[in-house]
Amino acid sequence: MSLLAKIDRYLRRTGMAPTTFGRRAVRDPRLVGDLRLGRTPGPGVSARVDAFIASSQ
């Protein structure tokens, strides 16, 4: 599953705003919007997002 798909599923489940997610997960409020526009995340960003989602479950 792609990183964006994981994030979108998390956002639907929690009702969190995309900017709030980006700010809390990686200190980048533009993360989700940029990913939707084609940004390719580095391995560090991917790891931090996965860790944030895992810690929230």
Image (cartoon, helix red, strand yellow):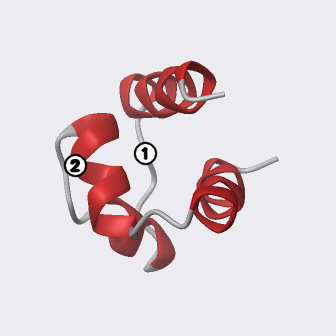
Pointer 2 with pointer 1, Cβ within 8 A: no
From the top left corner, tell me how far across and down residue 43 is, in percent. Answer: 46, 26
**Residue at x-position 43% and y-position 80%:** 37
Q: Residue lying farthest right? A: 1
Q: Residues within 10 Å of mark 1 (few under 14, many from 20)?
A: some
Label 1 SS: loop
Which numbered disc flags the more N-terminal residue, 2 or 1?
A: 2
Q: How many marks?
A: 2
Q: Residues within 10 Å of mark 2 (few under 14, many from 20)?
A: some
Residue toward you, 21 or 30:
21
Q: Residue lying farthest bottom? A: 37
Label 2 SS: helix
**Residue at x-position 66% and y-position 68%:** 12
From the top left corner, tell me how far across and down residue 35 is, in percent. Answer: 45, 65
**Residue at x-position 47% and y-position 34%:** 49
Q: Please tell me whether residue 36 is drawn above or below residue 11 in the rendered image.
A: below
Quadrant containing the C terminus is top right
Residue type, numbered disc 1? Pro
Q: Please tell me whether residue 12 is drawn above or below residue 48 in the rendered image.
A: below
Residue toward you, 14 or 52:
14
Q: Is residue 40 left or right of residue 12?
A: left
Quarter-wise, where is residue 53 in the image? top right
Q: Which mark is residue 23?
A: 2
Q: Is residue 47 left or right of residue 21?
A: right
Q: Is residue 4 left or right of residue 45?
A: right
Residue carrying label 1:
41
